[in-house]
Amino acid sequence: MKPAEAAETPAWAPPVARESADSPSARLAAVIAATVHRWIDSGETLEAKGRPVQPGDVMVLVRRRTAFVTELVRALKDRGVPVAGVDRMVLTEQLAVMDLVALSDFLLLPDDDLTLATVLKGPLVGLSEEALFHVAHGRRGTLWRSLVALAETEPEFRPARRYLGDLLARTDFSAPYELFAGLLNRPCPADERSGRRAILKRLGPDAQDPLEEFLAVCLAFEKTEPPSLQNFLAWLAASDAEIKRELEQGGGTVRIMTVHGSKGLQAPIVFLPDTLGSPTQSPPILWPDESCPVPLFAARRSQEDGLCAEARARANRRRDQEYRRLLYVALTRAEDRLYICGHQGKREPSDECWYRLFEEAMRDNGVPHSFDFTGLCPDGWAGEGWRLVGAQTAEVPRHVESEESAAAEPPPPWIAEPPPGEPEPSRPLTPSRPDGEEPAVRSPLGTDDGQRFRRGLLVHRLLQTLPNLAEAARETACRRFLARPAHKLTPEQQDAIARETLAVLSHAEFAHLFGPGSRAEVPLVGVVALGDGSRALAGRIDRLALTGDTVWIVDYKTNRPPPRDLEDVPMVYRRQMAAYREALRAVYPGRRVRCVLLWTDGPYTMELPPSVLDAAAAGLAPRVG
């Protein structure tokens, strides 16, 4: 693709008509995008696959990331062709990101007039030149104060003032991702639907990828740094912010990458649009090689001696060899089709460029072919080229189906049916945190100045730790613990708590609960069979003891008034112990499970008979519907 010959403009002709600049790279990008779009729309068959061409079948390889890559991405998106975007981008150089950074600078320093003017003219606010001049000209004070004052009297400026004022109010309380995701998804003065749509309308669909990558960078920043806007902008400016994408798989989109980055990859259809450029620069420093053991440097070619000239010739030869090795990589990426094209400026390409090498080879192997792209798009052209076609001899895989045949199959029946019920509740049964309402705890602000409340906590702690000690050492450890100044107990109170707690531990009927074979704070997790169903259970037993063929469960109730009659035991406690009993029956089959409640406000113990637990277990059955 060569530049079109520009018509000579008459001398002194007034510039009254807009003339579009001729760009060979943009025209070539438009033709490639239109070609891919036509293949997909017409359902052109890919012979080797036995199905229509899909966007993921196309790979575009370039030698360097130039403006052509951006033009091709834009051309493909304009035609609705899915494209993966470029494999690398410098985030801070993208126009959409620069607009968001400018808005951030204003939010941090509203008195910066130049930054505010950039935001007002940007895609999110969209003031005209005349409106901006009206705000700026003749103002007294900052541009922001002028906008605020005008918004009081002129409705034209109220949306911009309200929008920016709202962002200013939320800046100090929002993390970077929350701030930017919100302004991209909420309406703005330039678009009543979303800020994202306003940016895409101004900058085109190729701004979508930078916006998504910018939000991803915001999330990555918040994982490692304090989430403030000022810190984020400093972090973004200090980092290279170069986004590298892995495009190993097509993913249903057109891939655009460098030839060097395509090593190891293949695609059914490959375009090589960057074939007219060739390396011309020699390295400034000639590094040692097999013929010259020291590095050489010559500021000018005229200053080079014979040894330096020979070393430079060898360096240029290695450069050209690498250039042709890269050509081999590009040629071997195509599985079925390879399209070779190029665009040039006013300077004629070198005879050693890829395109000339192709052209020389096609004269001996290909056949001349006329092409006409004028019907594809307004930028198309016609001319002569070369073509080399090989017949499809390998058998087409039968397991590959076209999208049309896959779409013709009816969807599975489950797609229109409601989902089945969950086998168990989303929250497991937690006996220590029952579904029902527990009795109210004693207030620590009662008439006894919280003494009874504190007493219950101390008894609970003693009943948990003292059984782990030898019986002879329990009383000494108990009194030493109660005598700590932090408990604020008088000698009489210490003696009363110690006597009552030790009485429970040594009681003839329940002494085995705190003997050597018992354990404190035993976690219990499992599935409990209740009625016609089952429920998951997750809890912790305060005390568990095994004596012969009997399993004992003790649960402490702290800071609650103890009932003296079995009928007064709250139902939530009965269900809690019933759940524990059902779970331990599965753990210890064939053994009897007995349940005891111990109120530390006393202390006082009470065993729940099996009949009470059986009735409580019926209330734990899973609800139907």
Image (tube, rainbow, N blue to C red):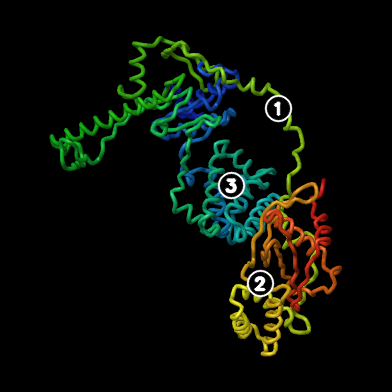
Q: Nearer the viewer, residue 49 or 533?
A: 533
In which quarter of the view is residue 363 placed?
Answer: top left
Q: Residue furthest right?
A: 567
Amino acid identity at mark 2: Phe
Quarter of the image with the N terminus in it: top left
User: Residue 38, percent across and down?
Assistant: 57, 20
Residue found at x 52% / y 32%: 73
Amino acid identity at mark 3: Lys
Between the C-alphas of marks 2 and 1, the distance is 63 Å
Near mark 2 (Cα within 10 A), the count class, few <14, some 14-19 or many ≥20, is many
Between the C-alphas of marks 3 and 2, the distance is 79 Å
Near mark 1 (Cα within 10 A), the count class, few <14, some 14-19 or many ≥20, is few
User: Residue 167, percent across and down?
Assistant: 63, 55
Q: Nearer the viewer, mark 3 or mark 2?
A: 2
Q: Which mark is residue 121?
A: 3
Direction from residue 202 to residue 386 in the image, left or right: left
Q: Nearer the viewer, residue 246 or 606?
A: 606
- The residue where tag 2 is placed is 514
